[in-house]
Amino acid sequence: VIGRRWWVAWLWIAPALMLTSLFLLYPTLDSVRRSLLDPEAQTFVGLENYRFLVENPNSFVLDTHSAFLNNALWVVVFTATTVGLGLILAVLTSRVKYESAVQSAIFVPMAISFVAAAVIWRFMYDINPLIGTLNAILTAIHREPVAWLQDIRAPQQWLTQWGPEVLPKPLHLNNFALILVAVWMWTGFAMVVLAAGLKGVPTEILEAARVDGASELQVFWRIIIPILAPTILVVATTLVILSLKLFDLIWVMTGGRFDTDVVATLYLRTTFILRNFGVGSALAVVLFLCVLPVSLLSVRRIRTLQEGR
Amino acid sequence: MLKVQPTTARRQSEDSQDVSKLRRKTPFRRTLARVPLHLVLVGLAIVWSIPTIALLVSSFREPSAISVSGWWNALAQPSSFTTDNYQAVLAQRGMARAFLNSLVITVPSTLLTILIAAVAAYAFAWMPFRGSNHIFLAIVALLVVPVQMTLIPLLRLYSALSVDVSMPLLGGRLFGTSSFLGVWLAHCAFGLPFAVFLLRNSFSSIPRDLLESASLDGASDLQIFRQIVLPLSAPSLAALAIFQFLWVWNDLLVAFVFLSDPSLAPMTLRITNLVSSFGSQYQLLTAAAFVSMTLPLVIFFGLHRYFVQGLLAGSVKG
């Protein structure tokens, strides 16, 4: 607009600038400061709170080691499974005419909250075979019902006698049962994003490869995967960030009991139930430092994808 | 942003049929070869739907029937369905109030986020000044901050600035913890980096000539913003609105920290409390969970396109 005063632009951005400074920038700096103070935020204690996380002195109440290991398991297993399933579904649905119907059925869980999903799956996992669908199926094939959310045995034990009965720390049946719920919710997201990417693969290339005698498997590994690689990376970074910050599912399904805590549930319990703001802030900072490199990658990726469009 | 383009799907399947013809398969053998594909896809779609269907069916069963026989038995005798569980949950367990609280929290948060973000995004897109791009990038960079990082300082801040006057009509304090205003502002601030990012990109794609000619005709910034920029960006605004609405509607964390007062709790928090006190009373839990899912499901089926776009675009949000 001609003759606009210099301060007009500042007026337009002022509300957004004030809110983000007050609710995001200032608290971030303050959390870092608080992580170096004692629980009452009075005296400077150096890295004492971080040492608490590393040395895990109070493992009966706050098992930090278990939480870190569980989080690592979540990041790897949840991301790999969801991306893999989403990719397979994107490719398979692109070959049928009722594509959108199947995609809708798988995408629906994205709409509901983690809390509602937790209720749904507590019901699915119930120990009573007259209530829990999964245990009803196990009983029907003459197996003992399994306490999915409490059981810390090795995961293969629910169906076979093969292998060791207990695996080292995070590889417990209940962790996998929880991860499965998140996979159920987020596969639709991975599938829809990858399906959209797949539409962008030029059909001429696929045709040419098939005419030249490439098998469908070769087309998948040698053409589709390399072309989709940037999209796959966007989906994977999103899911990694999600699995680092996720807490509500675990909070409602197990409350972090039976060795299912992750960093975000530990943070919530330390801070708002045990009221230890020093260790709580340290946990938040650790979470932030884990998320940071992945988020930066994700934001940059999204930007390049947009510019390339 | 990533867009779904359904039109190319048909062309692609026709193409792959042409290729199959080149291989000289008979139509019958071609259909036969595709049977496993159909089985896998239909099977997966059913498996994916079973948990939700189980919830829905159980929520309409007699409380006494739930622990006596599996939910699949109820499908054989639909006459036994009842809405008692919904009445119990809505009236006695406070879900009606919680539903209202969810609306009171979500609608203003969503509108506020979009309003503040759109105004700022217009300035970033069409009122460039020295350093404006740096300020824009700084706001977007705050996307990487997890909400957890902000909660302790905000809790202290809210306690210090608490205004202990009751909020007219809605209940709770005017400001501080246990106040709707505090939660609106928090949700709005957490949504802003992404919303500003999305809307500035959308606003910048409007042709410069259009705005310049309006400006030469004497239109003010406010007129250009309201009569040209907002209508032309309607799809982005709709996608953002749906994304932000669902984000706030499904939130547990912010409510857990700032709205611990039971009379102000939204449905997510109310259900969480029901689970810890009535963990095995599935007639209550299933009905409560389904009440909380109704609005997201209506949006999903009613505004499918914007819903998918909003979620895809919003997947970068922190």
Image (cartoon, coloured by chain):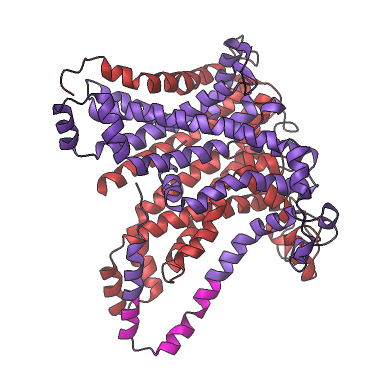
Residue drawn at x 67%, y 21% is: A276
Residue drawn at x 47%, y 23% is: A24
Residue drawn at x 61%, y 18% is: B168
Residue drawn at x 46%, y 63% is: A100
- Which of B36/B199 is in front? B199
- Specify the colour of chain B: purple
Q: Where is residue A192 in the image (x, y as percent from the top left)?
A: 44, 56
Q: Where is residue B30 in the image (x, y as percent from the top left)?
A: 43, 85
> Magenta residues, as a range?
B16-40
- Which of A73/B119 is in front? B119
Chain letter for the red colouring in the rendering: A
Vertically, is A254 above or below B52? above
Side (left or right) of A217 relative to B174: left
Give the quarter of the image for residue A11.
top left
Vertically, is B137 above or below B55? above
Does residue B28 belong to the magenta stretch? Answer: yes
Q: Where is residue A51 in the image (x, y as percent from the top left)?
A: 61, 25
Side (left or right) of B171 relative to B5: right
Vertically, is A247 above or below A212? above
